[in-house]
Image (cartoon, rainbow, N blue to C red):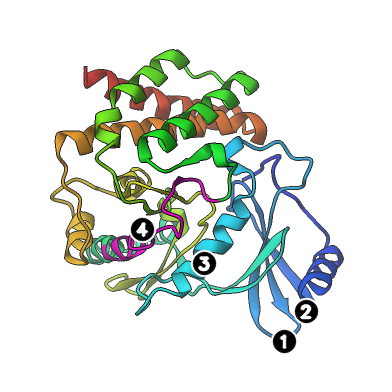
Amino acid sequence: MQSHTKRRVSPAELDALLRTSVGIGCRTEAELTDGWFNTAYRVLLDDGEPAVVKLAPPPSAEVLRYERGILATEVMVYRRIAALPGGGVPTPALLYAGEEFLAVSVLEGTPWDKAAERLSPAAHTALRRELGAVTARLHTLAPDDGRFGYPAAASALSAPDWRTAFTAMVDALLDDAERWRSPLGVRPEDIRTWVAEGGYALDEVTEPRLVHFDLWPGNIFVDVTDDGKRARIAGLIDHERAFWGDPAAELVSLAFGGDTGPDSDLVAGYTEAGGTLDFSPAFRHRLALYHLYLGLLLVVECGPRGYDAAHRENCRRTLADTVSRLRALG
């Protein structure tokens, strides 16, 4: 995907960046073009280890408020996952990190969206159940300071309670929408009203947990047998959008890969691994707000990233669907 936030460098420049920052050089093998925000290269490090190097946008690039410093969020998540007792959340190993980049190990397997046609129905079911369990273990991670919101953004996007943090997160996107004249198709004051009306539901969330918020199939690597009958989760990638918040919000991106309802395979795996999702009226109200937040994010980010007309229209439809869902709540 092409984006104005991507920073492309020559093989010599990438080698020099790593050599100067962490004392090891690399040989660039290919640019990995599936990403939407950062630039990523597959490289061979001087010690012979293959790696993926992800570059933050250049300092001159326009980004949304919540995106400021999110490479540091991804580094933090890799480190927290690596320290989980007993593991249980497969992800690349963080090899090196600097202010402008991170380098991680290469995952086995294939992104789920590219492997989907090879999967038997039974393998798909088992993978969704396993993904639920992996997500539950991810949600055991909590912030050291007890605050909700974005860990790497300005303090205005975090707070000691979830209602305040989530309201600030929405307000930041609405400010960005005004700046980029984003075609929301809904009045900002209506969005703020819906968030305020959901305050009672947001207040039920009292313990912040790590929410990846980008677990669509392209960010989930799977290892599939040649006959497609057996598969496993090989790893989760792209943790930069993570925030400390309500585990229910994870269902928003997970829904891009299949059913996330109370009787779904994913929720069965989640609860079997110790997670709790109650699907009460307040839970469903919060979930509608989180769908609204992602729909808003997708539309607003089209401005600074310069996406094409077809993608912009698809994002507008996604936001319109979430608005209809909230209006249906009355």
Label 2, secondary structure: give it: loop
Q: Which residues are magenta?
A: 133-151
Image mark count: 4
Q: Residue at x 21, y 39 (%)?
A: 283
Are dots 2 and 1 in contact, CB under 8 Å? yes
Of pointers 3 and 1, the one earlier in the residue sequence: 1
User: For the residues carrying marks 2 and 4, which lies nearer the camera in this image?
Assistant: 2
User: For the residues carrying marks 2 and 1, which lies nearer the camera in this image?
Assistant: 2
Of pointers 2 and 3, the one earlier in the residue sequence: 2
Q: Residue at x 54, y 18 (%)?
A: 183
**Residue 24 badge:** 2
Which residue is labeled 1 in the image? 47
Label 3, secondary structure: give it: helix
Of pointers 4 and 3, the one earlier in the residue sequence: 3
Which residue is labeled 3 in the image? 78
Tell me how far mark 4 sits from mark 1, CA to CA: 37 Å
Label 1, secondary structure: give it: loop
